[in-house]
Image: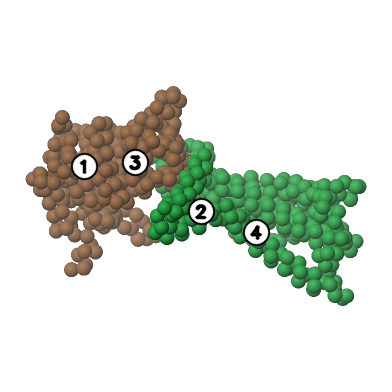
């Protein structure tokens, strides 16, 4: 079964296409004021994401990717512009935009099950019975293959397993948008590819809308429908948006020789290392 | 079960090389070193117990010996250990005798003191955690209250006694107040630090889940700050035990503190020494008790 590539609204970020988008990051700018010094982090970010789309955001360290993700999550306020989810402005954090953090952020005093159950109890307190909430918790743990470790505490499981539980907790909130903040950044290469495959399978099954931050080029090309490439800060903005026209489901091994994959990978590398080199690398030459 | 099965296996395997050695000569050379630790299994446990109990016993005996020699001279001002044993044997042997209103075993006196500590420390723990949470959570509360706390916490316990006697006009609540005011500062300060150190990630999770203040307090704040809170409680219980003895010396009654003062006034030096040992042991037990509760209550939190 080959799923169609998600609907594409536009290829350049500046083209303000008419009509509604599922998630619209509308000309967002963000600056931090420290005393009298104001540092502009993000400028004029405009991005439309369709329902079910998997969008990766890539850029060098310090380009404000995480800031943008936190703005979408509602954890940070915009300086100007707005984030619209289904045409409604979002200002506060909420379970409709669940975040998977880089360092898992599981509560260490709760078991794997209770970490997910806390979210389930909170989000579905009114709509699901006790029994249904238990079943839903277990369902999400099984989805990330962590049902076997439900009674373990976070300190007793590996980094990859913690990240799986973090993903289960986020999925259990049934978010409209799943926000992944470098979810595999702290993992070793093998664990990372396992988890990428899991996330791909889950996305295939649930058709979530995903916004993922990464600085791994292969990961971005493998997982996403579109890759948003960020210029360097200060005042970072979207430099280019690349559509990845690879059919799904994608197989890691088959893609190695795929011309579309190689081309997409080359385009991202070219953007990152030829045109928008990291400031530190520039200085070294 | 599993370990006993493992033991059986070990015995089996210990027997095999020996019988094998009888048949094949060279194998004995290889199997011999394996037998030594197996023979030492049971003694190993005893050796471990001995390793923790023998050194303190040796040091204690040496100290008693030195004390005996030092206090044996005719001009010695303090009793020797043997003299203490003779004079205060009743106190040492039976902690719970009752011979009259003021002639009771040290166990009863310690219990009276412990009761006061329980009330004073209990109040200090409850109010200390509440105030610490306020100071840790609110910047304005911290700015307003922290300087006052920093000054008040340096006031020695006994300096509070006259003013509390004046306020309560009774010795029992005054002693409890002194315990309270001594123990509360480390609880407040450690709780505040614990609350302030809650990782931003946990706060973010709470915001995404839209936990209400009560849920945030019970589900995130208390468990996240628990290791700090228990550090404060542990310091607090130690300080309350220090303060109760001093307070009771001045307020009278049946406590262990008053017993020491009373013994001093009637020149029963041996009784004082016995009471000191009681106080030390009880203080040690209290400290370990809070540490134990803390370890149980904060399982898993320390390692993130």
- For disc 4, the marked residue is B53
Which residue is pictured at 12% across the width and 40% down the height? Answer: A245
- Label 1, residues with CA under 10 Å away: few <14, some 14-19, many ≥20: many
Identify the chain drawn in green. Answer: B
Q: Quadrant of residue B152?
A: bottom right
Which residue is pictured at 25% across the width and 45% down the height? Answer: A193
Q: Label 4 to label 1, Cα distance in Å?
A: 62 Å
Q: Label 2 to label 1, Cα distance in Å?
A: 56 Å
- For disc 1, the marked residue is A223
Q: Label 2 to label 4, Cα distance in Å?
A: 24 Å
Q: Nearer the viewer, mark 4 or mark 1?
A: 4
What chain letter is assigned to the residue under label 1?
A: A
Q: Nearer the viewer, mark 2 or mark 1?
A: 2
Q: Label 2 to label 3, Cα distance in Å?
A: 44 Å
Q: Are marks 4 and 1 on the same chain?
A: no
Q: Are marks 2 and 4 on the same chain?
A: yes
Q: Label 3 to label 4, Cα distance in Å?
A: 47 Å
Q: Position of residue B250 (x, y in %)?
A: 82, 57
Q: Nearer the viewer, mark 3 or mark 1?
A: 3
Asked whether residue A92 appears in the rendered view, the answer is: no
Q: Nearer the viewer, mark 3 or mark 4?
A: 4
Identify the chain drawn in brown. Answer: A
From the viewer's perspective, tell me whether residue B266 is left or right of residue A42.
Answer: right
What chain letter is assigned to the residue under label 2?
A: B
Mark 2 near mark 4, Cβ–Cβ under 8 Å? no
What chain letter is assigned to the residue under label 3?
A: A
Q: Are marks 2 and 1 on the same chain?
A: no
């Amino acid at each position: 079964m080959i799923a169609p590539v998600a609907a594409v609204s536009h290829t350049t970020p500046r083209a303000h296409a008419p009509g509604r988008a599922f998630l619209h990051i509308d000309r967002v700018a963000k600056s931090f004021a420290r005393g009298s010094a104001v540092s502009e982090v993000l400028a004029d970010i405009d991005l439309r994401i369709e329902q079910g789309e998997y969008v990766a955001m890539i850029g060098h360290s310090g380009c404000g990717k995480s800031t943008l993700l936190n703005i979408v999550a509602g954890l940070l306020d915009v300086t100007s512009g707005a984030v619209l989810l289904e045409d409604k402005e979002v200002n506060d954090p909420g379970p409709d935009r669940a975040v998977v953090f880089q360092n898992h952020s599981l509560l260490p005093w709760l078991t794997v099950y209770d970490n997910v159950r806390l979210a389930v109890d909170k989000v579905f307190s009114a709509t699901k019975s006790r029994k249904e909430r238990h079943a839903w918790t277990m369902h999400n743990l099984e989805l990330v293959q962590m049902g076997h470790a439900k009674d373990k505490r976070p300190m007793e499981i590996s980094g990859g397993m913690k990240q799986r539980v973090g993903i289960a907790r986020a999925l259990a909130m049934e978010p409209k948008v799943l926000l992944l903040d470098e979810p595999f950044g702290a993992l070793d290469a093998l664990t990372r590819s396992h988890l990428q495959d899991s996330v791909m399978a889950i996305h295939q099954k649930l058709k979530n809308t995903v916004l993922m931050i990464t600085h791994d080029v292969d990961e971005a090309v493998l997982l996403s429908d579109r890759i948003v490439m960020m210029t360097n800060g200060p005042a970072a903005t979207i430099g280019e948006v690349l559509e990845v026209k690879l059919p799904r489901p994608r197989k890691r091994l088959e893609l190695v020789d795929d011309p579309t994959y190689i081309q997409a990978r080359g385009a991202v590398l070219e953007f990152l290392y030829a045109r928008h080199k990291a400031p530190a690398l520039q200085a070294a030459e | 079960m599993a370990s006993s099965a493992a033991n059986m296996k070990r015995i089996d395997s210990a027997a095999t090389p020996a019988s094998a050695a009888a048949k094949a000569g060279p194998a004995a050379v290889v199997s011999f070193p394996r037998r030594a630790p197996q023979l030492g299994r049971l003694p190993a446990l005893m050796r471990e117990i001995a390793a923790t109990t023998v050194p303190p016993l040796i040091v204690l005996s040496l100290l008693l010996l030195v004390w005996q020699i030092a206090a044996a001279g005719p001009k010695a001002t303090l009793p020797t250990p043997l003299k203490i044993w003779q004079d205060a044997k009743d106190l040492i042997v039976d902690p719970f005798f009752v011979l009259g209103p003021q002639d009771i075993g040290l166990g009863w006196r310690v219990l009276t003191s412990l009761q006061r500590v329980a009330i004073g420390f209990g109040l200090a723990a409850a109010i200390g955690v509440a105030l610490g949470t306020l100071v840790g959570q609110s910047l304005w509360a911290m700015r307003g209250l922290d300087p006052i706390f920093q000054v008040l916490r340096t006031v020695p316990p006994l300096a509070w006694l006259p003013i509390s006697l004046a306020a309560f006009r009774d010795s029992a609540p005054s002693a409890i107040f002194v315990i309270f005011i001594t123990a509360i500062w480390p609880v407040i300060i450690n709780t505040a630090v614990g609350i302030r150190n809650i990782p931003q990630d946990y706060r973010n999770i709470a915001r995404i889940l839209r936990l209400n203040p009560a849920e945030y307090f019970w589900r995130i704040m208390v468990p996240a700050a628990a290791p700090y809170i228990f550090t404060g409680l542990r310091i607090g219980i130690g300080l309350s035990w220090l303060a109760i003895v001093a307070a009771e010396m001045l307020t009278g009654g049946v406590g262990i503190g008053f017993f020491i003062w009373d013994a001093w006034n009637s020149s029963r030096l041996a009784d004082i020494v016995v009471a000191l040992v009681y106080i030390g042991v009880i203080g040690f037990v209290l400290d370990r008790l809070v540490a134990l509760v803390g370890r149980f209550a904060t399982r898993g939190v320390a390692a993130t």
